[in-house]
């Protein structure tokens, strides 16, 4: 198999697995992919400016403003005015927002664990363990 076919096959399989994982979470069905991505960025970064979130999610600041309004109304995020510059507002997750992320991760992990346990042989599990560093190398390369 040449690298072009390998790349296409890998992309297809990863996308299919990602789609299946997304369907396994009851806690985030009401959110768009961009809203989920925004919440994930805030989970990894304790505080970000709306403009930084817009860049990270590759959307306009106006679209990010709408997303943040929705998430704030649902008490997923909170806005904190800057002490140095009153025009700037930092965005962070509320305790409820953090619980949402943790619940979603738990649901996905449990579904994937169940599929691994019921579908893969011991030999396939060991092979998957060996492939993890390679997948990590691909995901972290620029």
Image: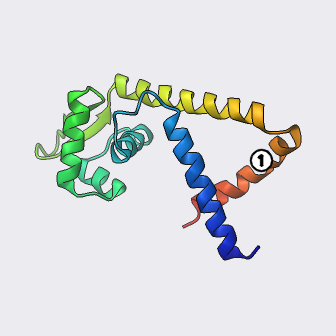
Instruction: Tell me the element at label 1.
Output: helix
Please give left or right for residue 92 compared with residue 66 in the image.
right
Could you tell me which quadrant the N terminus lies in? bottom right
Q: Determine which residue is flagged by label 1.
A: 128
Position of residue 128 measured from the top left corner of the image (x, y, whole percent)? 77, 47
Q: Residue at x 70, y 34 (%)?
A: 115
| Residue in front for this viewpoint, 86 or 13 | 13
Q: Residue at x 65, y 61 (%)?
A: 10
Q: Residue at x 24, y 42 (%)?
A: 67
Position of residue 3 measured from the top left corner of the image (x, y, whole percent)? 70, 74
Report which quarter residue 134 is drawn in.
bottom right
Q: How many marks?
A: 1
Compared with 46, 18 (above or below) is below
Q: How is the structure coloured here? A: rainbow
Which residue ends up furthest to the left in the rendered image? Answer: 87
| Residue in front for this viewpoint, 4 or 103 | 4
Please give left or right for residue 108 compared with residue 44 in the image.
right
Could you tell me which quadrant the C terminus lies in? bottom right
Compared with 91, 74 (above or below) is above
Please give left or right for residue 14 compared with residue 81 in the image.
right
Report which quarter residue 75 is drawn in.
top left
Position of residue 58 measured from the top left corner of the image (x, y, whole percent)? 33, 59
Position of residue 38 measured from the top left corner of the image (x, y, whole percent)? 35, 44
| Residue in front for this viewpoint, 13 or 36 | 13
Q: Residue at x 81, y 41 (%)?
A: 125
| Residue in front for this viewpoint, 141 or 74 | 74
């Amino acid at each position: 198999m040449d690298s072009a076919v390998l790349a296409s096959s890998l992309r297809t399989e990863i996308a299919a697995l990602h789609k299946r994982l997304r369907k396994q979470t009851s806690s985030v069905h009401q959110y768009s992919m961009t809203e989920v991505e925004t919440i994930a960025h805030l989970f990894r970064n304790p505080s970000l400016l709306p403009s930084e979130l817009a860049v990270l999610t590759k959307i306009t600041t106006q679209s990010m403003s709408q997303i943040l309004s929705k998430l704030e109304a649902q008490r997923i995020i909170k806005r904190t005015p800057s002490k140095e510059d009153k025009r700037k507002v930092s965005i962070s997750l509320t305790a409820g927002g953090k619980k949402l992320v943790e619940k979603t991760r738990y649901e996905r992990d449990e579904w994937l664990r169940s599929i691994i346990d019921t579908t893969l042989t011991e030999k396939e599990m060991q092979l998957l363990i060996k492939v993890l560093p390679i997948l990590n190398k691909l995901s972290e390369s620029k």
